[in-house]
Image: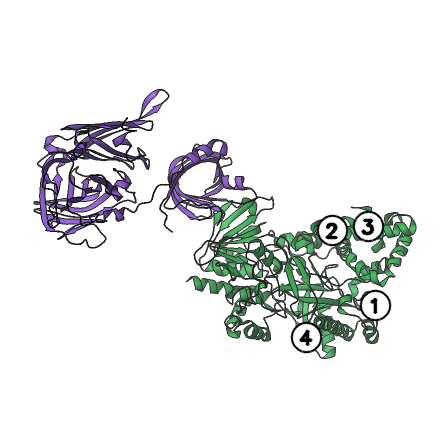
Amino acid sequence: MSAAVRGLVAALLADAGDGGWPAGVPRRLDGLLAAMPARTRHGFRAAAAAVDAYAAARTGRRLDRLGPGERERVLAGLAARPALLPLLDVVKVPVLLAAGTERLLAEPPRAAAPPAPQDPPLDCVPAGEWPDRSRADAVVVGSGAGGAMAARTLARAGLRVVVLEEGRRHTTAEFGRRAPLDRFAELYRDGGATVALGSPPMVVPTGRAVGGTTVVNSGTCYRTPDRVLARWREEYGLGDLADPVAFGAYLDEVERTLRVARQPRDVLGRNGTLALLGADGLGWRAAPLRRNAPGCRGSCQCVVGCPSGAKQSVQLSVLPQACAAGARIVTGAHVRRVLTEPDRPGGPRACGVAVRRPDGSELEILAPLVVVAAGALRTPPLLRRSGLGGHPRTGRNLAVHPATSVAGRFAEPVADGGPAVLQSVGVEELHEDGILVEATAPPPGMGSFVLPGVGRELRAELEDSGRLATLGAMIADRPGGRVLGREGALLRYDLDPRDGRRLLRAVRAMGDLLFAAGAEEVLTGVPAAPRARTRREFAAALEGVTARKLHLSAFHPTGTVALGADPQVAPADPTGRLRGVHGVLIADASALPSCPEVNPQLSIMALALAVGEGAVRAAG
Amino acid sequence: MSAARGTVFAETMTGTVRLRGEDRERPVRLELTARSEDLLLPHRTTAALVTGRLRVAGRADTAVTGTLEVSPLARRRIHYRLECELDGERCLLEGWKSVTPRRPLASMTTLPFTLTAGDGPEPAGTGTLRFRTATSLAPFLASFRFPRRDDPRAQWAPRWDGTAGRTEVWYTTATDPATGTGLWLHHELVAPADGSPAFAHGWAAVFPPQGKGPVEHARFGPLPWGPAKGAGGFTADGVEAVPGRLRGTAGGLSWDLTEDAGGERPLYTFPRWSWRHPLLPAAQIVPSPRARYTGTVRHGTSELALRAAPGASARIYGHGNARRWAWLHADLGDGDVLEVVAAVSTRPGLDRLPPLVFLRLRKDGRDWPRGGLRPALGRAGLGRFTADIGLPRWTVTGRAGGRRIAVRVDQPAERTLALDYADPDGSPAVCRNSETADAHVVLERRGRGGWRTEAQWTLAGTAHAEVGDR
């Protein structure tokens, strides 16, 4: 840990060196940075060094040698420059993450949770123990929503299926044992710091574990809206696949598997109740969300793995069924290439995969069917590495749900230590306009909401964060992104001006909701005007603000190897077969032709089920 | 795609294997011979059949058979699939070299493999074999052969082009492995030298084992020769000798047999060119040198049921019989076969020469001597193979390419059938044939300490031989 980083943490958190939870933040931050990609790590350290240099130039001493008052003045000097505020916000994100965890640990422990239930059995083999050479009937790359469903479908059809997963298996018991941040760094790709470059840059968190992103999503289960299915049929030629009855049956099957039901109000938590109250005050449509978490105990830790085993992520629901049908899962397996046989009569044919183990050695599995389900961000680079990314639209058409959040301060504690569902209530009043507001209260520091201020102001916000209710809004975008690169995924996403307007409208709507629920103050998330005590102030704070000034995240990347009837436009055909090669199926979020406008887990799984069953039927 | 030539090579790899339930690695050695119908071209995918031996120290020393797919550029893979036996259980050894341009040598010489047995998900063992360039490269390269690919079926088609004064023979000999009975089926087309119409005739003969009883034989024909029907071969009035099928009736003898050529390529006793371009007075080849015959032969009141009886089908085309000749077909077992023709021509001048020997030994899949005329002509006349033709014993000896061979054939009179032959010009000859002859063959190889016996075969009553003269 460099002195610059130590100094920056102390300055941001107004740590007077008097012990308490801030003392542990630098060490925890160090652990978090180690999990992040090198460019993020170096970027953070460079920012810390720059602040340190500024302090040295201004005071003659480095930041960690200064007293609390001097540090406060140095940061205030920086924060006075509006151009630097967004940059400071970026630097604050990992610090707040580490600080949130340390604060949580410092709090008196909640009532001891009942012991975690035993997870259903999975046939997981670490890549190091898998033979160098093996054979299967089908290989599924990725064990997330799409891969798990495809694996179960193929295994039940009698195929010998091997699922390859880059991450490892995390058990419910382990989630119950470890601190949220420790899980966070391991469960997310790039330590959660995957960034889409563009204007504005956005963080696109995706999971990496047996179960994929379903391990770390909030469990919200929306069926694919009919208007989206209609668009898929009419604009993308998916007449058979997106047939409302047929796709509806697939969605039913997925819902049965995941035991989807409306979240009961007993453990909803204050955050959700306030959202309902606000919607009620405005006369807006709102209800607890449908979720795949029967018996949810309100641990409010969905995004770092459910510690009570209630959330039916695919590693607790679909994958055990796949394993019961004979599928095997290889963990720690990074698929280097899809192997092809270019000299086959009738054109090139996939014949298996080459896999790199964590120790750098390689293994290969031959299989006549390769299902690529590495996620919308990882599937295009894999295809390119394999020489299968020749279609000009591979990696394009990246759709995400740009999202932002707004917090409201209430007189009573919101996070009162009682049970609460992380993403509890959906406000669908504006859904037809592409705006979905969801009451979301993640563990401290892990949400997309960044507390305002630096130094003492930030510290005070942190200490008082128990009275904050958070709403998040995601909007249906015009696909405007690209996944570049072969080895790693380089994301490029430019926000469409229409989507920017939608985001601002969403912020206003969330402000209205919070005030209607009785918020004393709304934290806008706009660095230049962070607080508003009335609706008028709130409207004034948003005056002249563009979406670029908001702190944005992006969720649910989809569409990078889209299915479609037009060979010029879609890299994969309407049955999920990748064009230009035999034996490769696309069965993950990348196959979705356009933004699903809702949390996409059910859509992805239903599509993977359809693609898998189509392949089984075609094979006879 | 069919190529004119195939590929044969041998490869030896060593390495280690860790078997299921064991905590240590065992040395392992794999010796393979690969045979492909196609020419091995690096940019193509070549499939080959392999046979060989797998040795796992302390656990197994077993024969392996399987397939090999060589595709270093197109599929970047050299894929081995071998069946073997481990502790009495059938086992599959599968692995492939995954060729990468980043590490061409290492990737082309490293073969990770998995042993699987039964249906369980866990492999019976995993390991890695390596091709050691220091010790194995030279023998590997030296082992490459590109044998010409011959379809034996094509050699059954009639050669006769309508020229007068030609004779063409399809003949089959076999030994019943159950009883030791010998069988001789002879189908002959004769185009008389005087221009009269060609006719077909022939005979069948059954040789009781060890001369216990007289040799039974019966002739068929002469029959008018019509254009051959079917797949090509000898077809005349119910008597048929075509690829895969032999049937007919001659007097009290009738036969109906199927032939399984076993995928063996033809054996050219005479040089291949002499069969294609009939420049020599006559030439003989063996389209099915190691065939197996199944079916029935009825003679008189008894019936001989053959099941996979070893034998051979051969062809002769030329001007007529030699002045003096001897012939031997010996199935030596284990895939080895010996064919000898020693003959003195009827041509003026040539008839004063000692017998010219045409000898081909197919051992371990390779034919020796390599040159087709080497035994007959030697090197500019020196070092020819010699034959001492006589009865009941005749011998052939010769030396070529660091090896020498001594063949001794015994045709006791009681096991021999004497038949009158007639050339296209009408001149007679007598043939003394036995399909229950004895033979003794010694093959020696020259090493540092002089000649050492490489192989020795004794055939008691299973050699097929004849001696003819005028």
Would you name the residue on which mark 1 appears?
A529
User: Nearer the N terminus, badge 4 or badge 1?
Assistant: 4
Depth-wise, is mark 3 or mark 1 nearer the camera? 3
Kind of residue at badge 3: Ala
Q: Residue furthest front?
A: B349
The answer to whether A285 appears left or right of B297 in the picture is right
Above or below, B451 relative to B183: above
Mark-to-mark CA distance, 4 and 2: 41 Å
Depth-wise, is mark 4 or mark 1 nearer the camera? 1
Q: Chain of mark 2?
A: A
* Quarter the C terminus of chain A occupies: bottom left
Would you name the residue on which mark 3 appears?
A49
Q: Residue at x 41, y 43 (%)?
A: B82
Most foreground residue, B125 or A381:
A381
Kind of residue at badge 1: Ala
Quarter of image, res A290: bottom right
Residue B275 point in image, percent of width and height: 25, 42
Residue B137 point in image, percent of width and height: 47, 34
The answer to whether B398 appears left or right of A249 in the picture is left
